[in-house]
Every structure is written in structure tokens, then in C-alpha cells.
Amino acid sequence: MIRSFLAVSLTLALALALSAADWPQFKGPNGTGVSPDKDLPTEWGKAKGQKWKAPLPARGVSSPVVFGDRVYVTCSGGVRDDRLHVLCFDANTGKQLWHRQFQATGGTSAHPKSCMAANTPVADETGVYALFATGDLAAFDTDGTLRWYRSLVGDYPTITNQVGMAASPVLVKDRLIVPMDNAGESFLAAVDTKYGKNVWKAERPREINWVTPIVRTVGDTAEVLFDGPSGLTAYDATSGEKRWTSKLTRGSIPTGVLDGDTLYMPVGGVTAIKLGAKGPEGEPVMKAKDVQPGMPSPLVYMGKVYGVSGSGVVMCADAKTGKLLYKERAKGGYSASPVAGDGKVYFLNETGACTVIDGKADTFEILAVNELGEETLGTPAVAHGRIYIRTDKALYAIGK
């Protein structure tokens, strides 16, 4: 009986783990923008469909991240936008569990649409790592205790970007990968998650770049793929050594998508390259030249590749052939990247209206248009059967 009970308990635990995935970084699991969750919401509004709503102390264009029963979000405010905030909420109730603030040490110049809370944090079972556009980097445990803090501008004084930085950190086991391409000293660094010290630091061209790194596993080796204006470079996550480079793609704002061994990059529309153990294998295998994403990153879902322009044109093509399936206009202007799950694709515009389309269809089939009526530039998070949306005023949990 005990053995049977344990077997049933393990089965249930595994089922729950598979049906309610975390969203620990920008664009979720390894930056795919896709959640395996089921029963995701289709319709909501200011007065319906909300699990909870929590006020935020200041604005931000970063995305919320979810790990376990914690939702983390960053904000920035003050007269000079130099007051930095990291907040943690209970994912089920919306109760604020803690709120930490500190003063920025770097410059706060940015495009009016952006702010210093532009980089999306990354979370794991130990807590959250928050990078700000000022070059301030902090690690907090799940209870809000500061584990370590670094002023990257203090370490590397020439770091500068007068229009703002937004590339987000990612995790590879016990290493925090920190992208810091800018007009000053540029680098990609692996920081020890326990103490915040550099494990390795790879010099990069002094170029402004907002792309977030992607992690790829090749055999026993983890690679960090980092695109930029000078091309795509793969770094060994353990040593920081360059493994290969490619000029097939040169991006600077939207981040590509890794789907199996195929990398979809927002270059020339969306270009797909097949990756082998030593990098790209031959010429691109697919070019969707009619899918022209603006600042939002492309999405690959259910055999299709999606993009949305800043003006709100939704484009969809076959992910294998690049053939355009449709190009239709959705409501509003867009900065947030599309996300998907449960057969649905979500496009969140800058006024808080989310257009939900059928991801199974080869035609543009709108399931709902949901209004929150608040400015929203950050990409939503999808976790635990809910959609988490941050606006300039509040953090919303949409769904059951």
C-alpha cells in the first residue's frame, strides 16, 4: 500500500510539474516565449478574469518572472529615474512579500519610452538576480535578503548608453550570464551566483546592443549564443572561450529563438539556420522575408513563425518554408514580444490591450481582444496556468 501511495504521489507531482511550468527569465523557458501550460485564459478585462492585481511603486518596461510561488518584478523611479526597486509577490494571492530599494550608481539617460527598469530579471530556486540599465546588479534570496550587489559602472567606468540598456541576464547552472554591450567597455561575463564575482569575462565590440543571450547544450557543453551588430558568437559557458562565430545574422534589438537545433533570427525578416556541434551548418534553411518584427522578438510556435511590427501588423509564416500565411493588423502599437501556450498566441500592445489569436489556425483568427487600459511595454509571463502582465501602475495575474 505504501509503495502504491508513493507511486501515485510521485505521478501526481510529476504531472503538476509538467502542467505548471515556471517562467524564470525574459521570454520564459530559454527565451522561447512558449509555455507548456494548459487551460490558459482567453478573455479578461479590468473587471473580469483577474486572479489578483497588485500596485507597483514606479514604472518599468521589464517583464515579470515567475519561479515556484514567487513573482519578481523590477521598477525605477525618482526625479532622475535613479531609484531602483525589486519586488516579490506571492504568485497565488498577489500579496507583496517584500520590496527592496537602492540608489543607482550609473547614468540614467534613456529613450523617453524606456527607463532604468528595462532589463528583465532572472530567477531560480535561490531567489532573483536583477540587472538595471544603470549597470547596477543585485542578487536577493527568496525572502528578500541581499546576497550580493555590484556596481558594474564602478567596476568598469566607461560603460555608457545614452538611449538606455535592456539586454537581460540568463542563468547557466551556478553562473549568471551578464550581457553588457554598450558604447563604452563592452563584455559578456559569467558571474558566480553565490558571491557575485566574475568567473570569466569576454571582451565585446563597443556597440550598442539590446539582444538577450540564448543558452544551447551541445553534448556535455553549454554554449551561450550572443548576437549583435558584428554577428553571432557562441561562448563556452564554463570558460568563456569563443567556440564559433557567424556573420549570417547581425541583430541589435529583438532576440532570436532556438527551436531544437534550428535558430530563428530576426534578420532579413526571420532567417533560420541549422546548428551543428561546431556552429551553423551551411546556408540558412529558411527565410521568412515577409515576417518583419520591429522591436518585439519573433515567436516560433506550432510550426509557424510570428512577428509583430511596432505599428501593430501581425505576420505569420510557415516555420519550415518561410511561406507567408497571413499579414493582418492588430490593435495599437507594440513593444512587448508575443508569447504562446495552450494553442493560443498573445499579442500585448502598449495600451494594455491583448489580442489573442488561434495558434492552431493557418489564418488570422482572433479569439478575443482584452483591455486593461494601462500603458504596457513589458512582455507578459506565462506560468502556473496564468498570464502575468505588468503595467506602469500594477502587476496583474490573469486566469484561474
Image (tube, grey):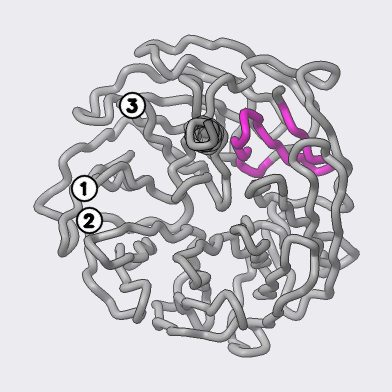
Q: Residues within 10 Å of mark 2 (few under 14, many from 20)?
A: some
- Which of marks 2 and 1 precedes in the sequence? 2
Q: Tell whether position 379 is magenta.
A: yes
- Which of marks 1 and 3 precedes in the sequence? 1
Verify CB contact (< 8 Å) between mark 1 and mark 2. yes
Tell me which segment is drawn in magenta. 377-398
Residue at point 71%, 22% (across, down): 400
Residue at point 72%, 52% (across, down): 72
- Give the alpha-carbon distance from disc 2 to disc 3, as whole Å: 21 Å
Q: Position of residue 160 (x, y in %)?
A: 61, 77
- The kind of residue on which mark 1 rests is Ile
Q: Position of residue 199 (x, y in %)?
A: 47, 84
Q: Which residue is label 3 attached to?
A: 304
Q: Which mark is residue 273?
A: 1
Residue at point 37%, 45% (across, down): 257
Q: Does residue 139 appear left or right of residue 259 in this picture?
A: right
Circle 2 SS class: loop
- The kind of residue on which mark 3 rests is Lys
Q: Position of residue 148 (x, y in %)?
A: 70, 79
Residue at point 46%, 78% (across, down): 187
Q: Which residue is label 2 attached to?
A: 248
Q: Position of residue 266 (x, y in %)?
A: 36, 45
Q: Residue furthest front?
A: 1
